[in-house]
Image (tube, helix red, strand yellow):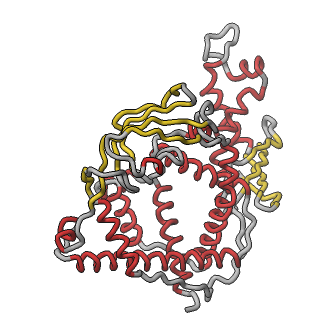
Amino acid sequence: MSSTIVKTEKNEVTLKIQVSAEAFEKEVQQAYTKTRGKFNVPGFRKGKAPRKIIEINYGTEVFYDEAINTIFPTVYGEAIKEHNLNPIDRPSLDVEEIVKGKDLVLNLTVTVKPEVTLGDYKGIEVEKKEYNVTDEEIEKEIEDMRERNSRLIAVEREVQDGDTIIMDYAGFVGEEQFEGGTAEKQTLVIGSGQFIPGFEEQLVGVKMGEEVEVKVAFPTEYHAKDLAGKDATFKVTVHEVKEKELPTLDDEFAKDVSEFDTLEELKADIKKSREDASAMRVEQEYKDALINKAVENAQVDVPNIMVEHQIDEMVHQFTHQLQHQGLDVDTYLQYTNAKMEDIREQMRKDAENRVKTELILEAIVKAENIEVTEEEENEEIGKYARQYNMELEKFKKSLKDSDYENIKDGIKIRKAVSFLADNAKK
């Protein structure tokens, strides 16, 4: 087998692959052996007809497709390796010459990873933001903890904003009671916005046991079309009124909600956690800014097929997220009145940025000869094993060669980002 590059245009490479007549004849003979049972030839039992007889009846080229399909992966792989190409899509194949007794000549066109022209990526200068933890943030988190540990206390007074009530109600449009507008022992937090606008506000001041009429107008965009935009009256009876009681903010509260003995210790821990989170945010945003600058300074022609593949991956992740929420794609599209084409188009710009960023970081890995040590690889594999709750050796045996390459590539990308940070202008 021999191969030559006959054409290079943008990110497409056309290869001419020549397979010797002897090698191709061997594949044709194997194709005959493999498929002869499919042919019916008069005078011969099925699968027993000689190759020459089958070719006379069905044509000399009858076994060519099978032979090419068998030999193609091998010769294609050898050609890709010989010319150091990095394909990103399936090749298109054209048979230039196929004549019995002559060499087989194949032309294939394949899209390859684009060449990247790096700009300045060392000595980049970007602003490093700082996020200071304020006393107000700490106090807010403490108040949130109080809210989560509050309890409802029954009270005998008029309804106030923020109260939780137990009520019965029945809804009417004119004199007719409408479907779905009736409930008993319904719980409602006044001010939560759970009901139609104007409903909850009219219950403020109502006494326990009192029956009132609440007049509202359904929004014009209301989901029930037969009610949208219409005036309605709800007959409401308030059975119970409960107010929220917050725990006293003292050392006992700290003991109840945490591992600490004092309120000051709890606040100090909250402050440290927030400071650690802020430091991580600062560092991540700093690295992101360095990456964006390196990408901005580089030049690369991103093939559309790479963008489409990235969108495919993003759609897969999006579908997975919907499933976690108990939805499927069709239901989501129906609910949002959207099409999958719309979703893909919304993802396109982000997908282009992701692909371009990955290409630039890979180019930096190559330019700086960034490698992965055995220790780094084993440490990363160990993390995955713990994540999947598997023994290390058992997890290693489950990995394919491509998995190991993907793991190493991920480490290289992270090291490239660290390289940008280490070599940035301080």
User: Where residue 81 sits in the image (x, y, percent)?
Assistant: 64, 59
Q: Residue at x 70, y 80 (%)?
A: 119
User: Where residue 206 sits in the image (x, y, percent)?
Assistant: 38, 47
User: Where residue 98 sits in the image (x, y, percent)?
Assistant: 80, 38
Compare residues 162 and 362 and report the one nearer the observer. Answer: 162
Q: Residue at x 33, y 42 (%)?
A: 166
* Image vertical order of residue 268 relative to residue 228, above or below: below
231 with respect to 5 (left or right): left
Compare residues 421 and 99 and report the one nearer the observer. Answer: 421
* Image vertical order of residue 96 relative to residue 50, above or below: below
Residue furthest bottom in the image: 426
Q: Is residue 322 visible?
A: yes
Could you say which quadrant of the image residue 121 lies in? bottom right
171 with respect to 162 (left or right): right
* Image vertical order of residue 52 relative to residue 314, above or below: above
Residue furthest top in the image: 43
219 with respect to 281 (left or right): right
Compare residues 285 and 262 and report the one nearer the observer. Answer: 262
* Image vertical order of residue 411 relative to residue 72, above or below: below
Compare residues 407 and 241 and report the one nearer the observer. Answer: 241
User: Where residue 268 sits in the image (x, y, percent)?
Assistant: 28, 80
Q: Residue at x 58, y 53 (%)?
A: 314
Q: Quadrant of the C terminus?
A: bottom right
Could you say which quadrant of the image residue 364 lies in? bottom right
Could you say which quadrant of the image residue 51 lies in? top right
User: How many numbered badges does the structure rendering display?
Assistant: 0
Q: Is residue 82 visible?
A: no
